[in-house]
Image (tube, grey):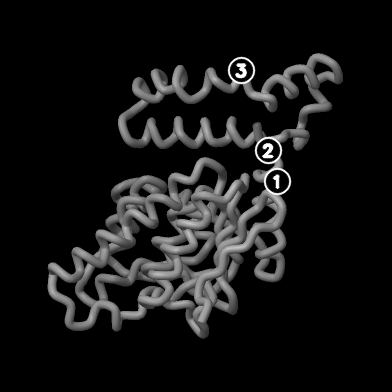
Amino acid sequence: MSLVKFEVDGDLGLLTVDNPPLNLMSQGVIDQFAEAVDRISVTPIRALLIRSAGPHFMAGADVRVFQGKSAAQARAMFARALPTFARLEELPYPTVVAVQGLCLAAGLELALCSDILVAGESATFAQVERHIGTTTLLGGVQRLAERAGSARAKQIIFDGDQYTAAQFAQWNIVNHVVPDAELLDRAEKLARHYAGGPTRALAAGKTLVRRYLDVGIRSADHSVLESAVGLFESEDMRSGVEKLLREGPKAIVGNQDFAGR
């Protein structure tokens, strides 16, 4: 049974979790997710949209994967899963996630690995691990701290409460809140917009943000010389500069005339 599907539509990759009714992260989902990321990493796309089938994005893990495991067995399981999430996060192009319904625990951790989080207005978010005596196991709390600050991240994991999309947007965790009926269309349009952009430039910007977050502004400044100046020899930057000089500033607003090279 296919629980995780990866498809390509032009320059856009589509990653879909389909494990009804709640899209729980079962062992099968974990295994197929890793296989899908393997395929994604070698597929020439320029943006990725992550989504789930049905009314809920993902209501957490199937806790049967935890039952009876020793610390050593848990370590082995997450030593495989964590690098898969990191590889998704480090893809060299924009990633967008569309979240509807429940987005809890492992579901929120998956969503936080995307660059841009688009939520339906009725979506509900939480890290509920405290209620079964554990904490986030796939990087949730550290990514919440990265987006919302350490105090807010601790509140979310200490309380285990559920929050609205509007509240998460106010805390800079969610990027866009849209009407439920428009969620998939709006998220896909945004992902296609990124896919039509200057892919190398967007990747360089993503790298600089990561460098700043990991080691600070000064190191990110030095990384400009590694990750950004090479854009001067890219087809996209050269064509963009020529278009500006030839047609003027209005012509490049929302410019999608990029080859991704």
Taking the spot 52% from the left edge, 32% from the top edge, the residue there is 205
Q: Position of residue 113 (x, y in %)?
A: 44, 54
Taking the spot 17% from the left edge, 82% from the top edge, the residue there is 68
Q: Are marks 2 and 1 in contact (CB under 8 Å)?
A: yes
Residue 193's disc is: 1
Of pointers 3 and 2, the one earlier in the residue sequence: 2
Out of 209 and 29, give the one closest to the viewer: 29
Above or below 160: residue 232: above
The kind of residue on which mark 3 rests is Phe
The kind of residue on which mark 1 rests is His
To which residue does mark 2 refer? 197
To which residue does mark 3 refer? 232
**Seen in the image, is 123 located left or right of residue 212?**
right
Mark 3: which secondary structure? Answer: helix
Above or below 205: residue 34: below
Above or below 199: residue 159: below
